[in-house]
Image (tube, grey):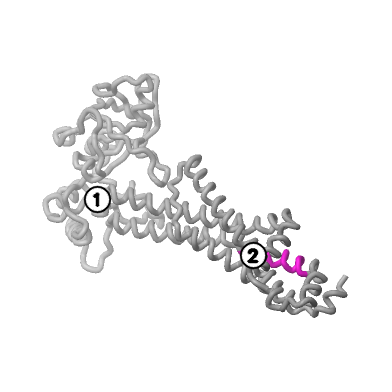
Amino acid sequence: MNFTNLLKIALKALGNNKMRCFLTMLGVIIGVGAVIAMLAIGQGSKNSIKAQISEMGSNMIMIMPGAERRGGVRQSSDDMQTLKPEDYEAIVNQASGVKYISPMVSSSGQWVNGNNNYPSQAQGVNTQYLDIRQRKVAQGEMFSEADVKTAAKVCVLGKTLVTNLFPDGTDPIGKVVRFGKIPLTVIGVLDEKGYNTMGQDQDDMALVPYTTVMKRMLAIDYLQGLQASAVDEEQTQQTIDEITEILRTQHKLREGQNDNFNIRSMKELAEMISSTSTMMTVLLAAVAGISLLVGGIGIMNIMIVSVTERTREIGLRMSIGATGRDIMSQFLIEAIIISVTGGLLGIILGSLATWLIKLLAHWPVQIDPSSVILSFAVCTLIGVIFGFYPAAKASNLDPIEAIRYE
């Protein structure tokens, strides 16, 4: 019997039980759709993170105070006092591989303008911070080195703060706002960046001279961190080694003593995030793939039922000349049709789910063509694997016994 006749018989048999056929497909549809959607979320997140890190530059270096314990309790990095302004000066003067560097101190509190207030942070930085983070001042200007030296009461606001403190659209430049009890004159507004991949509002920030935060807000004499940029990406690790040596000398650490500071590069962070993202994507896809397995079991179950119901039909066909191979091919074709049709519908469902996630949740998503091809290939394979046993069972029936079956 040729393939065309077998295909017609298989389609007619499936058409006689449309609802049962659709419910059998449902497991495959959901499985393929879930796998595509999960892989799209993972791939989109990974690409978005890479793009943001690329924007900041993989030559960015973060220097944080090291781990300290007091009474057996690990201290917060904001409370550690192992980084001093003198360390910053030493790096500026001695590190040849550093292009830009900025001290980092921050204070949380309430920003107030008249009757409007908004909770946020005052980020203490210097004039090179914008170069490191590749940000620009869209309106007004950045504070100067003179403002840093004199701990001037000035600030540059992000768009979110401007929107909340000046809801009527008033030009903020030149206006005096308060951070807690400290009055600060707004001299600039940062360019708008929006939310990053982690859902963090990049415009919810205010830049203040780091000396102002240290002296007027926190009353501290140490830094909470440093951010720097290497001259180029190739020299990032060399620059990290150079900074490490400078800080060890500054802190009078002997050979064998652990560093009391931590240095990380964006390249290292990008690799770590990418690895974690890949692992989570695979895990999500594996969990979603379980429904594909369940769908395959459903196909096998319904095909076994079908073989049992059509035992007399199988016997009659074999008695008039159909071979065991013909019977096996027919039931295998039925299983593959269910699986492949379910796979195609699953691809549509997965694409629709991905589009809805992007539209409603605003998550970065990207459908990788390889994930579609892989999902389709797997569901086809499932049709063959789980349809083989029922097909083999049907082909091995004795024609006489099959005709007598009630």
Q: Callout 1, which amino acid?
A: Leu
Image quarter of residue 204: top left
In the drawing, does residue 305 fall left or right of residue 257? right
Residue 171 appearing in the image? yes
Q: Which residue is mark 1?
A: 83
Residue 248 appearing in the image? no
Q: Which residues are magenta?
A: 293-307
Give yes or no for contact between labels 1 and 2 (Cβ–Cβ under 8 Å): no
Q: Callout 2, which amino acid?
A: Gly
Q: Which residue is mark 2?
A: 296
How packed mark 2 is, by other alpha carbons closer than 10 Å (few <14, some 14-19, many 20 or more), is: many
**Which quadrant is the C terminus positioned in?**
bottom right
Asked if the stretch drawn in magenta spans residue 301, the answer is yes
Residue drawn at point x = 33 percent, y = 31 percent: 159
User: Closer to the camera: disc 1 or disc 2?
Assistant: 2
**Which quadrant is the N terminus positioned in?**
bottom right
Q: Give the structural element (helix, strand or loop) at label 1.
A: loop
Asked if the stretch drawn in magenta spans residue 384, the answer is no
| Location of residue 20 in the rendering, given as x and y in whole percent from the top left corner | 73, 57
Residue drawn at point x = 80 percent, y = 71 percent: 311
Residue drawn at point x = 46 percent, y = 42 percent: 362
Q: CA distance from mark 1 to mark 2?
A: 60 Å
| Location of residue 342 in the rendering, given as x and y in whole percent from the top left corner | 61, 57
Image quarter of residue 326: bottom right
The prevailing secondary structure element of the residues shown in magenta is: helix
The residue closer to the viewer here, 239 or 243, is 239
Q: Give the structural element (helix, strand or loop) at label 2.
A: helix
